Image (cartoon, helix red, strand yellow):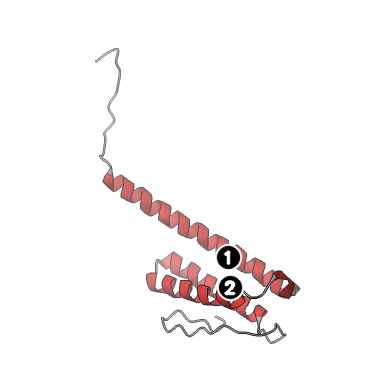
């Protein structure tokens, strides 16, 4: 996927430069972000902690590379890629939040005392 690896070797190198038809520059980096977000989604689906760590590292590196570019540096194609990346990131964030909420609920259930149903009728003790 766009030359981005999640094998732990940190080999994804950001592409720097102006956007051109060969996919270099902002456009190329956005494509890499999309690929990493797709890898992150797969890692979330399989609960692969190593792949999640690698995806986080790659996202951080790519975001640092993209930081100097403002909205005025985006052509229509790059703008569409940025919107796609934002949508994918939103989906992944929701999945992470859902997983965290499920873990919290399970831990809370483990920590609370199990109560059986007891009728509380003060009129007829």
Foreground pick, 123 / 82: 82
Residue 73 position, x and y percent, is 72, 75
Distance CA(mark 2)–CA(mark 1): 7 Å
Where on the picture, by quarter, is residue 66?
A: bottom right
70 to the left or right of 107:
right
Residue 69 position, x and y percent, is 66, 75
Picture disc at residue 67: none
Task: Determine whether the residue tagged by mark 1 lies in a helix, strand or loop.
Answer: helix
88 to the left or right of 26:
left
Identify the residue position indicated by label 1 in the image: 88
The answer to whether residue 46 is seen in the rendering is yes
Of the numbered discs 2 and 1, the one sitting upstream in the chain is 2
Where on the picture, by quarter, is residue 52?
A: bottom left
Residue at 72% in and 85% down: 21
Residue 63 position, x and y percent, is 56, 73
Residue pushed farthest front? Answer: 68
Residue pushed farthest top? Answer: 123
Q: Residues within 10 Å of mark 1 (few under 14, many from 20)?
A: many
Task: Determine whether the residue tagged by mark 2 lies in a helix, strand or loop.
Answer: helix
Q: Residues within 10 Å of mark 2 (few under 14, many from 20)?
A: many
Identify the residue position indicated by label 2 in the image: 34
Q: Are marks 2 and 1 in contact (CB under 8 Å)?
A: yes
- Quarter in which the C terminus is drawn: top left
- Quarter in which the N terminus is drawn: bottom right
Foreground pick, 43 / 90: 90
């Amino acid at each position: 996927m766009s030359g981005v690896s999640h094998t732990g070797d940190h080999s994804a190198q950001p592409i720097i430069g102006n956007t051109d038809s060969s996919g270099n520059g902002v456009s190329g980096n956005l494509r890499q972000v999309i690929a990493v977000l797709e890898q992150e989604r797969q890692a979330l689906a399989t609960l692969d902690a190593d792949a999640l760590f690698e995806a986080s590292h790659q996202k951080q590196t790519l975001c640092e590379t993209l930081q100097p570019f403002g909205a005025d540096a985006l052509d229509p194609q790059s703008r569409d890629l940025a919107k796609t990346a934002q949508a994918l990131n939103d989906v992944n964030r929701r999945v992470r939040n859902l997983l965290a909420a499920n873990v919290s609920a399970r831990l809370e259930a483990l920590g609370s005392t199990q109560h059986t149903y007891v009728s509380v009728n003060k009129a007829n003790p």
